[in-house]
Amino acid sequence: MYIHWILDSAEAEEMTLDSLTTLDIEYKQECFLNERIECYTQKSDSGTNQGTEINHLIQTNEGKVLLRAKSVWN
């Protein structure tokens, strides 16, 4: 489920699965039924020809970090 949230949060038209080059995930904790989940993204140009980098943070609405990830897209 976490990977779906990460991919859904990178919802720009040009970002298709074919353009995903790197996906680094750091799992912290699991989530439980009825927990409210928040997904945050921060998009930046990597400054090189490596494409667009997105940092992902998934946490509960109480602030419990569930996952941190970084994706790179061409």
Image: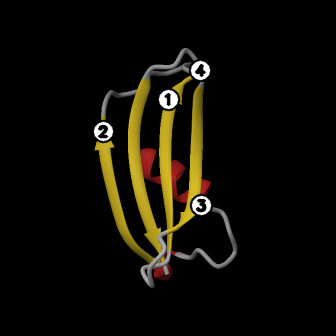
Q: Secondary structure at mark 3?
A: loop
Residue type indicated by callout 4: Asn
- For label 1, the crowd category at 10 Å Cα-Cα, with few meaning under 14, some 14 to 19 and many 20 or more, is many
Given residues 66 and 31, the one toward you in this image is: 66
Q: Secondary structure at mark 4?
A: loop
From mark 3 to mark 4, how far is it between C-alphas? 20 Å
Residue bearing mark 4: 61
- For label 2, the crowd category at 10 Å Cα-Cα, with few meaning under 14, some 14 to 19 and many 20 or more, is few
Residue bearing mark 1: 59
Residue found at x 50% / y 29%: 59
Residue found at x 60% / y 54%: 9
Which comes before the other along the chain, label 4 or label 2? 2
Q: Are marks 4 and 1 in contact (CB under 8 Å)?
A: yes
From mark 2 to mark 3, how far is it between C-alphas? 18 Å
Q: Are marks 1 and 3 in contact (CB under 8 Å)?
A: no
Above or below for 50 versus 8: below
Q: How is the image coloured?
A: secondary structure
Residue bearing mark 3: 10
Residue type indicated by callout 2: Tyr
Q: Is residue 22 left or right of residue 6?
A: left
Split into 4 quadrants, where in the image is the N terminus? top left
Q: Position of residue 36 (x, y in %)?
A: 60, 23
What label sits on residue 27 in the rendered view? 2
From mark 4 to mark 1, how far is it between C-alphas? 6 Å
From mark 4 to mark 2, how far is it between C-alphas? 17 Å
Could you say which quadrant of the image residue 27 lies in?
top left
Residue found at x 42% / y 80%: 50
From mark 1 to mark 2, how far is it between C-alphas? 11 Å
From mark 1 to mark 3, how far is it between C-alphas? 17 Å
Q: Position of residue 17 (x, y in %)?
A: 49, 75
Given residues 24 and 42, the one toward you in this image is: 42
